Amino acid sequence: MEDRRKYFGTDGIRGVAGIHPLDPVTLVLLGKAIAHVFLKQKGQHKILIGKDTRLSGYMIETALASGITSMGADVLLVGPLPTPGIAYLTKSMRADAGIMISASHNPYEDNGIKIFAADGKKLPDEEELEIESLLAPGKLDGLEAAPTNIGKATRIDDALGRYTVFLKENFPRNITLEGVRIGFDCANGAAYHLAPQTCTELGAEVVTRGASPSGRNINAGFGSLYPEVVRKLVLEQNLDIGIALDGDADRAIFVDEKGNVLDGDIVLAICATYMKEKGTLANNVVVATVMSNLGLEKTLEKHDIKVFRSQVGDRYVLGLMKEQGASLGGEQSGHTIFTDVSDTGDGTLTALKILEVMQATKKSLSELSADFIRFPQKLINIDVRHKPELSTLPEVTEKITNIEGELKDNGRILVRYSGTENKARVMVECIDDDLCEKYATQVADVIEKEIGTV
């Protein structure tokens, strides 16, 4: 069965800026639809809009604001700010909804839209589907506000300062970053000023890369997809830690003082063991995704911490966290959620949490990650024509079943579709690199044969 959502993927709407559905006409209509969904209560309504540093953010922001104000709601424009900052400000400023304009780690030509409800949480599938349904021709005709009730747009000049204060308030007052030397790669994105400045104000010495956005250089050879940039910085300048953010700064990848790259799984392991020792790891559980390495489970088993797995996407991680009463969850890609502080992934907050552990334990990042057990992992992406239910592809399911029988308890295989692209993803974990490569290639070849684009 095909996914019912036409525009929304696992993390909002994404596409090429200026091309449907991110063309001006559709964006005005989308603004109207968002406003209509959130204008169900009486009173004056306001919707907050933020963006990363992409050039197309101006066009998208203006089109959305036009549609929203035409429905009678006001718009609060906060400018460039990380995605978690939009979630926080939506809630703290008591907006009816928040919109983040970003395509995360994608190149600058792409853009996207993430929507938050009044409580700062991403929308459930049902509300996304409701918004989609309103984009059909004629659905919103005649529902615009009367000329006397059209909304207005206001720029909020202190949004960055408000979020900086929030981050610093969630760093322990009895811990300082004085003497800590940090390398930041900000991907020329939304946190290019916020992240380095926050750590500097807490006492650290900060060296930056990817902190000069032009509108066209976001993620261009910098950021969490290119950890070698901050790795080189750490080794050349003898820094204590390197931190690479993505374009909208909702994820972080780390580099220890020896140049080892540490992904989100290791971050979860470090934070989980520290939080358990402090008594703040709720129910002694952690939520990861189906993509997280088996090593996370093996490492946390030694500390009597149980791992639950959700589907990919930080809103699904959050949903399972709520079900399990967890206070920590995240993804291998670097999204990490601390529900005692925020309900969305936050790269800068995660950086502060890791720095807290380092300072509180007086251990280097390499020492903190030393006991992590990682299984070899192979991931292959295949371009596909469409995304049928895997059970309807007999050759694919037969191949997966055969490999699972060979792996038994010594590994696992995962096949899923991307939520944002026309791709199938094959991931194999086992005790040997060559076997991972062999099994992943076998499944990828069968998928390519059945539904590939070649």
Image (tube, rainbow, N blue to C red):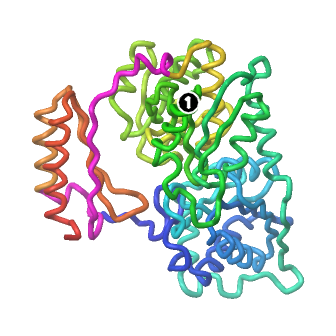
Q: Position of residue 6 (x, y in %)?
A: 45, 70
Horizontal side, residue 158 vs residue 323: left or right:
right
Relative to 317, say whether 270 is above or below: above
Q: Nearer the viewer, residue 343 or 129?
A: 343
Q: Quadrant of the C terminus?
A: bottom left
Is 148 above or below relative to 284?
Answer: below
- Give the residue displayed 58% in from the left and 25% down from the top: 240
Query: From where the camera sits, is residue 36 visible?
Result: no
Is 231 situated left or right of 280 in this image? left
Whether the magenta-drawn stretch holds residue 224 is answered as no
Residue 303 located left or right of residue 108: left
Residue 43 is situated, as x and y percent measured from the top left of the image, at 86, 65
Q: Residues within 10 Å of mark 1 (few under 14, many from 20)?
A: many
> Element at badge 1?
strand
Which image quadrant for residue 414? top left
Magenta stretch?
366-394
Quarter where residue 418 is shown: bottom left
Residue in the image at 78% along x and 38% along y: 166
Residue 118 visible? The answer is: yes
> Where residue 186 sits: x, y (%)?
61, 48
As drawn, the residue found furthest toward the front would be 236
Task: Check residue 373 for magenta coloring.
Answer: yes
On screen, 322 above or below 192? Answer: above
Residue at horizontal 30%, vertical 52%? 425
Q: Which residue is mark 1?
A: 328
For the image, the number of numbered tags is: 1
